[in-house]
Each structure stands twice: as structure tokens, then as C-alpha cells.
Amino acid sequence: DTAVSQTPKYLVTQMGNDKSIKCEQNLGHDTMYWYKQDSKKFLKIMFSYNNKELIINETVPNRFSPKSPDKAHLNLHINSLELGDSAVYFCASSQSRGRAFFGQGTRLTVV
Amino acid sequence: GESVGLHLPTLSVQEGDNSIINCAYSNSASDYFIWYKQESGKGPQFIIDIRSNMDKRQGQRVTVLLNKTVKHLSLQIAATQPGDSAVYFCAENKDGDYKLSFGAGTTVTVRA
């Protein structure tokens, strides 16, 4: 069983479109995250949720809206996609501030 | 802002040799550190972690050393194998923070 799964794995879309990435964890963790990895492999936190509550919003444009319907899910919706949004997006989860487990990533390409 | 960084972007190692990957951090309030391995097309995978009340921790073929005096973290891999080829990240967590701050990563290439 995959611990942290996100879909889709690849996403190619045109500028201006709206898209969503889904994430689910079956580890029973109370904290979930979205990270963005740029072309230079640098990983940067975007959002952090603890028990479905937004804890961290790291200066992300408000075109990005996370939603946590329950502790096992954290989805990422992106409006009006821009070329600069092209990156790999990783979902992760942890128990409180402990070790974070990462999904396989979603490679988003905006054309 | 404060961040965790790695000293070298690339490291080439002969198969069978030991590897040492270094990381410097600047946030003295950080109390938890993790090393991750990321293979091509995959997400970061946990290797080993250490809390600030320790200065050394060993796993299977890996050892993490923490020097709080100079804010330095290192990962030692014994008898490096081809499967160890990947990008390695150190990450820090500050007490009270619900996030990991990552360094830029070191790409390790193992030569046969």
C-alpha cells in the first residue's frame, strides 16, 4: 500500500486553466504538507495543515488554494495557471512535527 | 530567511568507498534534522534523523553527525553502492514549526 499517494503524476495544461492535484495518506498522520520543487531541485514548503487546520501558508499566491476535507486528504487547487507554476509538487505527511513521508510527486507543465 | 544548505552540489564516489555529504544550517533554534534521498522521478525518501540532544546516530550503512557548535550536519554512507546514486537533502525543523526547511541538495554519482 502506498503511504502517501498523489494524483495525477503528470499534468500538462495551458496557461489560464484551473487544475487540481489530489493527495491522500493512509498513515494516520495528523499533519500534511504541499512542497514545490523547482528545476534546480530546491524544495520549498507551500502549505502545512495540522488536524485539518491551515498552519503555514508560505507566501504562496492566492491562486493556490489547499483544501483538507479530512485528516487523510489534502488537495491543491490552482487557478489561472502561469508558466512559472511549472514544477514538481510534492504532498507529504507526518505525525505532528516528526518525520515527513513524501508522495511520488506531480510534474506540472504549463504551456 | 534562514535556511539549510549543502556545501557541495555534486559528489562523485568510487563504488565501495565511503561517502560524506555535508550540510550547514543557520537556524540555531532548529532541534530536529533529517536526511532524505531522492532518486530520479521519485519523492524524497527518509534516510535517517537526529535530534539536537544527540551528536551522532547510526543506521544501516549510514551515520549522521551533528555539530551544534558550528551548525554542521553530515551524512556518511559506508561502502557506497550504485543504488546510492541520488540527490541527498538535509532538512531542519525548528521547535514549534510545522514544516521542514530543505537545503539545495547534493547529487551523488557512484562510479563503477
Image (tube, coloured by chain):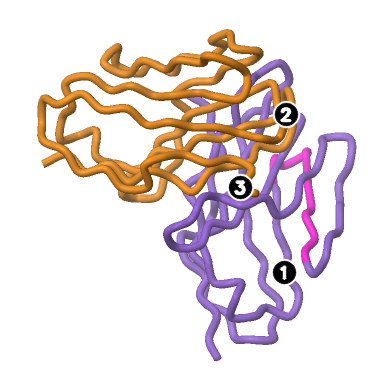
Q: To which chain does the residue with label 1 belong?
A: B
Work out which quarter of the rendered image holds the C terminus of chain A and state it.
top left
Same chain under badges 1 and 3? The reply is: no
Chain letter belonging to callout 2: A
Residue shown at 71% from the left, 40% from the top: B33
Q: Answer yes or no: do the residues labelled 1 and 3 have beta carbons within 8 Å?
A: no
Q: Which of the two discs, 2 and 1, sits closer to the camera?
A: 2
Cα–Cα gap, marks 2 and 3: 13 Å
Do the residues at discs 2 and 1 belong to one chain?
no
Q: Which picture quadrant has residue A50? A: top right
Label 1 Cα crowd, 10 Å radius (few <14 / some 14-19 / many 20+) = many
Residue of label 2: A28
Q: Position of residue A97 (x, y in %)?
A: 72, 25
- Name the residue that disc number 1 marks: B77
Q: Position of residue B17 (x, y in %)?
A: 69, 83
Q: Colour of chain B?
A: purple
Amino acid, disc 1: Ile
Dot 3 surroundings within 10 Å: few (below 14), some, or many (20 or more)? few
Secondary structure beneath dot 2 equals loop
Q: How far is mark 1 from mark 3, CA to CA?
A: 27 Å
Location of mark 3 (residue)? A2
Does residue A103 appear to the left or right of A18 in the view shown?
Answer: right
Q: Height in image: B85 above or below A93?
A: below
Amino acid carrying label 2: it is: Gly
Residue B77: give x, y in percent of width and height.
Answer: 72, 69
Residue A92 lies in quadrant: top right
